[in-house]
Image (tube, rainbow, N blue to C red):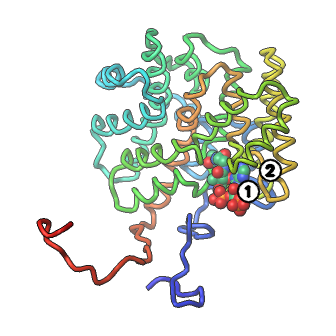
Amino acid sequence: MGSLDDGTGRPRIHKGLDDVYVKETRICLVDGVKGRLLYYGYDIRDLAKFSTFEETAYLLWHGRLPNREALAAFTAELAANRPIPKELVALLKDLPKNTAPIDAVRTAVSALGALDPDLNDPSRTANLRKALRLTAKIPTVVAAFHRIRNAQRVVKPNGKYPTATDYLRMLTGKKPDKRTARIMDVALILHADHSMNAGSFAATVAASTLPDLYSCIVAAIATLKGPLHGGANETAIKALLGIESPERAGEFVHDTLAAGNKVWGFGHRVYKTWDPRAIILRDVAKELSGRTGNEKLFAVARAVEEAGVAELGPKGIYPNVDYYAGVVYYLLGLAPDLFPATFAVARISGWVAQVLEYWEDNRIMRPLDYYVGPKEAVYVPLDQRT
Ligand code: ACO
């Protein structure tokens, strides 16, 4: 049992599952050496330039780009499924106002499962219906909760608009201009999938016991939340906002590392070079900094990037997607604690793809842990214990 390959008779322990492959996939390639990211063979740079979130989600679920009719039908179905049940709005209203949006989404997905008549239908067609409902409703949930916690009127979805436009409209109460909506669309495309990351793995572990799709997504959202994963965008922006000026960037990086801390938004298990998503988002952040007049934040981010790459680049540690995503979302006017939830608005498409692919050839996930505790403990009755 286990892989006895460290020469001591003990199994080799794959801490953090480093370098462990758990399935074959056709969905997503992360090339950590060349800094490339492909969805079904399509380069993320092309998708960011030419695609839309709807088209990308279709690609992830069906393995091919849709034709015009298929895309129109898929977009319309998503829009039609965007409204959320009144029971869910009531539940969101009952949550404490200081609930983090990512926690509200996790709770809402659980409730949506309970409300879905297809919950326990395991067929692929039912799962695609559930996937569509989830992908459609998560933006509405985030926006509704955000407005409820700020004592604002909940803005209902408008089926005329695609996901990115409607998400921003429901959050702010104002329809975004075309370019702003496109920037959100690009951010959603960039965050749609990323192979067997921690959140997708959590979804896959849950999936492997054959529960319903909602349960898998709850596991994924719970895992995305952490600052080592999708919570890094929020942690990173908070750090950047605390830096007085670009001139203090070197000192910030130095002090952070000297204290044994991490520079948030830097580093990746797979990329040992630039994350291509960070490069795209850096350009977007630059554009937004000019448009919004908040040039200081971008200048600070660039200066920390330069100081961080100088220190950490030789170890293969570079900015990841969360670094500039945080800057982009902030310049779009989103509150920092909305960032992880906004990540979920996009990543739901990838989680679904990963779970459906795993179910094509399911096997329960059951790794081992190597027992190093005592083996001959003698039970002492409670009244005789000191
Ligand atoms: N800042 C400073 N040092 C770092 C950083 C960082 N951001 N990331 C890694 N290192 C260092 C570690 O301290 C460690 O150094 P050591 O060998 O001297 O002990 C070495 O690099 C290896 O780091 P690990 O944490 O073991 O690398 P791992 O592959 O397990 O972790 C991770 C990857 C979790 C992303 C890590 O780089 C990190 O914590 N980054 C900051 C959080 C972050 O930005 N997460 C978002 C990732 S992208 C995403 O999930 C969407």
Which of the 4 quarters of the picture holds residue 12?
bottom right
Report the front residue among 54 and 302.
Answer: 302
Give the side of residue 355 with respect to residue 65, left or right: left
Residue under label 1, please give it. Answer: 271
Residue 36 visible in image: yes
> Residue 106's x, y, as percent?
41, 37
Mark 1: few, some, or many residues within 10 Å (few <14, many ≥20)? many
Report the front residue among 385 and 17.
Answer: 385
Q: How much space separates mark 2 and mark 1, taking CA atoms?
A: 7 Å
The disc label shown at residue 171, or none: none
> Residue 60's x, y, as percent?
58, 48
Name the quadrant of the C terminus. Answer: bottom left
Residue under label 2, please give it. Answer: 274
Question: For the residue labelled by badge 2, is the local secondary structure a helix, a strand or a loop?
Answer: loop
Residue contact between numbered discs 2 and 1, judged by CB atoms under 8 Å: yes
Q: Is residue 162 shown above or below 278?
A: above
Amino acid type of the residue that numbered disc 1 sits on in the rendered structure: Tyr
User: For the point 34% across and 35% down, which residue is it?
Assistant: 112
Which of the 4 quarters of the picture holds residue 173?
top right
User: For the point 60% across and 27% down, which residue is it?
Assistant: 336
